[in-house]
Image: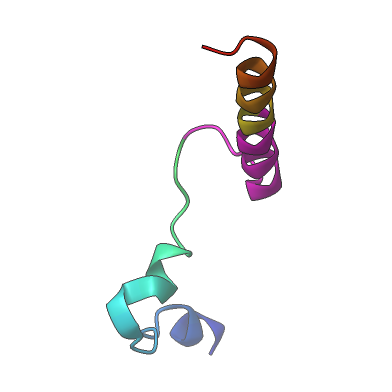
Amino acid sequence: MSSKKKNAPLPASSAGLLRFFEDETRGIKIKPQIVLAIAGAMIGVSIIIRIVFPV
């Protein structure tokens, strides 16, 4: 009975998003919070550089 459930088709979803999150991809795994923190830090550094070294 359990093998029948494993091979059952997945319910349809818009744009196949259900299957997208199911697939495991290769590469580095980074949390979204880290990406946002790095982006925020880069924006902050660029603002500080513009204030300290005006053109």
Q: Residue furthest left?
A: 15
Report whether 15 appears left or right of 35. left
From what the image shows, is residue 31 above or below residue 38? Answer: below
**Front residue (pair 39, 5):** 39
Whether 19 is among the magenta residues is no
Colour convention of the picture: rainbow
Residue found 64% across the figure and 16% down from its top = 49
The residue under the point 44% across, 45% down is 25
Q: Please identify the residue farthest to the front as the structure is shown.
A: 55
Q: Which residues are magenta?
A: 27-41
Where is residue 40 drawn, in percent x and y? 66, 37
In which image quadrant can residue 37 be found? Answer: top right
The answer to which quarter of the image holds residue 34 is top right
Q: Indicate left or right for 27 with 20 as reference.
A: right
Whether 24 is drawn above or below 51: the answer is below
Was residue 35 drawn as part of the magenta stretch in this picture?
yes
Magenta: main secondary structure: helix
Tell me residue 26's x, y (percent): 45, 37
Q: Is residue 20 above or below residue 41?
A: below
| Residue 27 on image: x %, y % | 48, 33
Residue 48 horizontal side relative to residue 54, left or right: right
Give me the residue at 40% from left, 64% from top: 20
Front one among 52 and 2 = 52
Total marks placed = 0
* 51 or 20: nearer the viewer: 51
Residue placed at 47% from the left, 64% from the top?
22
